[in-house]
Image (tube, rainbow, N blue to C red):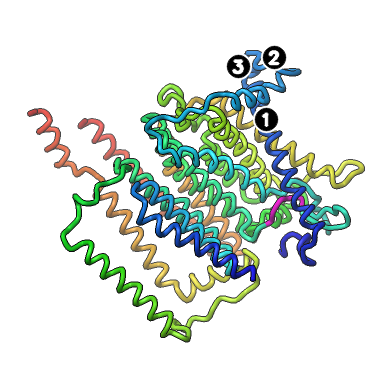
Amino acid sequence: MVDTVVFIVAAAICLTGALGVILARNPVHSALMLVMTLFGIAVQFVAQEAHFLAAVQVIVYAGAIVVLFLFVIMLLGVDRAQNLELSVLPVQKWAALVFAGGSCAVLALLVIVVKEPVTGAEAMGGSATGDENVRLLARSLFSDYVYAFELTSLLLVIAVIGAVVLARKPKNMSDVVTEEGSEA
Amino acid sequence: MTGDPLFLDGVDLADIGIMAAKVLIAFTFLLVATMFMVWFERKLISDMQNRIGPNVAGPWGLLQTFADGVKFFFKEDLRPENADPLVFRLAPYIAAVTAFLSFAVVPIGGSFDGDSSGTVTIFGRETYLQVADPPIGILLLLAMSSIAVYGVMLAGWASGSKYPLIGSVRASAQAISYEAALGMATVVVVILAGTLSTHGIVAAQSGGITRWFVVSSGIVPFIVFLIAATAELNRPPFDLVEAEQELVGGFHTEYSSIRFALFFLAEFMNVITMSAIMVTLFFGGPAGPILFGMTWFWPTIWFLLKVLAFLFVFVWFRATLPRLRYDQLMHLGWKLLIPLILFWLMFISLKELRAAHDWNWFATYGAAFVALAIGTSLLLAGLRAGDRAFQDELEEA
């Protein structure tokens, strides 16, 4: 009974937030709506007794990633309602509609067709304390999924290095800029 | 760890009553402590600067904060024309609510020596002297401090004005940078305690000063935590967020009346909460000798005294240290604190692993030393290359 109520309320929060992300005119409002969705998902995690995941959801996604989104929005000065008519590719709207409909269809199909576990991985059972949560998660992350985990971290390192390289002014480029500046 | 024994045998009306009382007491305590803290800071800093400080309202100016609070209520509530109405109103509440919530996990009393395991008996029911002992424990603090960034950031943006925006961008960059060091210093404690629960962390430190994590983790995590906490709180010398000389008042420039009061309240409340968290993580929480009579009473006294010591330290910082420049702030955070605490985290993990698996002492620490030497030289080379590139750029410019 309580579980159902919690699920319905949290799901409603998630969906409201998700709708808000796409419907809000102002990018900052969209980002805040995303935070709302993330909180809803955190509540769902708690309801499933995945306390650690809920905490990480709030700390990493709401606390760091969306803050970075906001950061970019504020620094780039796109924090105004944008005129959507100007920057649209001709078929963009129709393509978006097709993709969205396709995704919904695939999801619905999955819900209807799939009756048994897909990955074959066992559900992580354990007592509901936060410590046991962490222990189980760490064990599966660093044993069964260690390659995926390490490859992901490698990918992140590559992304960081790429960002640094792109952000750095190359030496000869800065020479060009100063020469142009002195000419002007 | 089974959590608060109050809820073990189902929940009845008395349990709810005790819970409500705990929430009410914690709430009132925080508010009164905040009032006292503002007075304490102003009085102490005026002593350090050879001034008198507030001395008109009440004995020794004790009621000054109260008078200020009343004044805030009666001031006009202004909203700039360019402000985003909804977000402008939302931001102060985010700041205030997160400040309240993180205090909930702090155990403020109860004896942890011997078999008593931190429970006290109220009306025939055993319970912990803390509002909540959630399974995520200390992670709640990290979650709340990362949500608190929103309060500052949105306040600055929603004001629709230059200085608050600069202040809030600085604030969020600073908070994100130092959260990493703060989190890793916390992880060292969590590894040593073997639990996330704040109650468990305090229980793991019972039995004498040498068991306190400030000693048994080596002093390094505590120092890193103290510096990172000062930066998270935007306290001097890390108060670039509201550097008066540059930014008028920082993110809350456009706020007035009770909305400004909420930010002010949140800031001082966070100082108290952070001090309480440091006492919990590193100084054994309410641990201390029970001198005479009333056994349940002394731990709370020790806890309050330890928190008071930290409050003093924060004011002392403010009176002593000049504000850092922005690049110095980032330098300290990224190039010094994070590598240092990362190294310490690995060292402590290795130590625990060696003890658990009974590895050979020389082989373990020999390998660790070689890895450390390689890592440090790589890091130093990288830092030097970065500095050189920066110098080149300066010369060219």
Residue beneath label 1, please? B35
Task: Determine the CA span between mark 3 and mark 1.
Answer: 21 Å
For residue B56, the mark is: 2
Q: Give me the residue at 80% from left, 44% from top.
A: B299
State the residue lying farthest toward the left.
A183
Quadrant where the N terminus of chain A sits is bottom right
Q: How many marks?
A: 3
Q: Disc 3: which chain?
A: B
The percent coordinates of residue A174 (x first, y second) are 17, 38
Q: Residue at x 54, y 51 (%)?
A: B143
Q: What residue is pinned by disc 3?
A: B49
Local crowd size for mark 1, using a 10 Å CA cut-off: few (<14), some (14–19), many (≥20)? many
Q: Is residue B131 magenta?
A: yes
Q: Secondary structure at mark 2?
A: loop
Magenta span of residues: B129-133
Amino acid type indicated by mark 3: Gln
Of marks 2 and 3, which one's residue comes earlier in the chain?
3
